[in-house]
Structure formats: structure tokens, C-alpha cells
Image: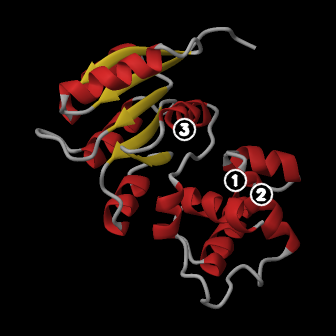
Amino acid sequence: MSDSPTTVVLVDDHPMVRAGLATLVDAAPDLQVVGQAGDGREALDVVATARPDVVLMDLSMPVMDGVEATRSVLAQSPDTHVVVLTSFSDRARVGEALAAGAIGYLLKDTEPAELLAAVRSAAAGHVPLDPRIAGVLLPSVGAPKPGDGLSAREREVLDLVAEGMANKQIGRRLGISERTVKAHLGRVFREIGVVDRTSAALWAREHL
């Protein structure tokens, strides 16, 4: 296993926030800040040069907001994982960020240790989400329980999604085609009431 540190780019329009994050991240021996940006447009230039493992992305910024920046960053650097770090916790903002491709979503009052753990988790391809965001995304307690109609195979597929596997990897593991995996996921999404694999992974971690 490589001893190279996980590389991180910080994107926030407040220099003090970036400075605090840089101090926190660089204090961890396995993490390294390799770039900073004050808006989404600048983030594209920094990511193009640094090719980081993880980007910590604010949402509300001038020039280009975090949602558009997330979409653009992932288009130019598909191996980079974007974790949103913001003060917004409403369903619309969360949904937009995850739909743009963010792998994680944290609030700015997250404890330092939890933030560092989330960076490591994202770098490993997992889905770090603030528990309060889970409450925004998941169905209300007391509602008819989704998921009861999942077949054994669909549960297997969902488990592997929660582990961070791509469709091709899931197909190899289960001995089925990628097309069949997609078909299973379509049924899974409808059954549990989600629209993307990030939300499905969160649901699986909470319910399976």
C-alpha cells in the first residue's frame, strides 16, 4: 500500500476558513493540502494542476458556485472526490450537490476529527455524509418502510454500492453483466425512493 499522503484542495471564498482548514488538514500526517481556491473558476485551474484525491468544496461562492464547480471539476478530473463543506443543510442544496457528483456532504460545524475522517473516507471511495444530512435525505420515521420488496440479488447489489463499488466491479463480483447491474439498481432506486447511488449507499448503511 502506498505511503503517499492523501492530497487535498480547499475551495472556499473566505481566506480565514481556508487557512483554518489548511492548518487542520496539514497537521494530519497522512493528509496534505496541495492547493487552495477562492471561487469555483479558480478551483478548476488548481485541480487541473494538482489533481488531488479530495476537494473540500464550499457551495456559496462568487464567479462560479460550488455545485457548478463540482460538476466541472469531476468532468476534468474523474478520479478526484468532491466533499461539500458548507453551512447549508436544506434538501434542495444537498440534492443539487449530490446530483452534481459530490461524494460527500458535511456542515461547517463538523468536529475536526470527523472532518479528517471524512476526507480519508472520501479518498477511499466511500460516502461521508453528516448525520444531519441523512435526516434531510431519508424518508420520515413512521412512513411505510421501503426496501421490503427488494430481492436477495438487489440487496447484494445495494450492499456493494454502499461499499463504493462501480457497476462494472459489482458485475464482476456477482458474475452478471453491467447492464444487469444497472437494471437491478433501477429497481432498487424505485423501491427505496432515491434517485442516485449516493443516496442509495446512505440508505443501505442505515437500513441493511
**Where is the C terminus found, in terms of image quarters?**
bottom right
Residue 21, position as x, y percentages in the image:
36, 25
- Describe residue 29's horizontal placement relative to residue 82 as left or right: right
Mark 1 belongs to which amino acid? Ala
Contact between labelled residues 1 and 2, with CB atoms less than 8 Å apart: yes
Task: Tell me if I can see residue 71 in this picture.
Answer: yes
Q: Quadrant of residue 19?
A: top left
Name the residue carrying label 1: 162
Residue 24, position as x, y percentages in the image:
43, 21
42 up-or-down from 172: above or below? above
193 up-or-down from 122: above or below? below
Seen as rendered, the residue at the extreme left is 63
Mark 2 belongs to which amino acid? Asp
Residue 111, position as x, y percentages in the image:
48, 39
The front one of 97 and 90 is 90
Q: Quadrant of residue 151?
A: bottom right
- Describe residue 12's horizontal placement relative to residue 97 as left or right: left
Residue 29, position as x, y percentages in the image:
57, 11
SS for callout 2? helix
Q: CA distance from mark 1 to mark 3?
A: 19 Å
Name the residue carrying label 3: 114
> What mark, if any, has residue 159 been given in the picture?
2
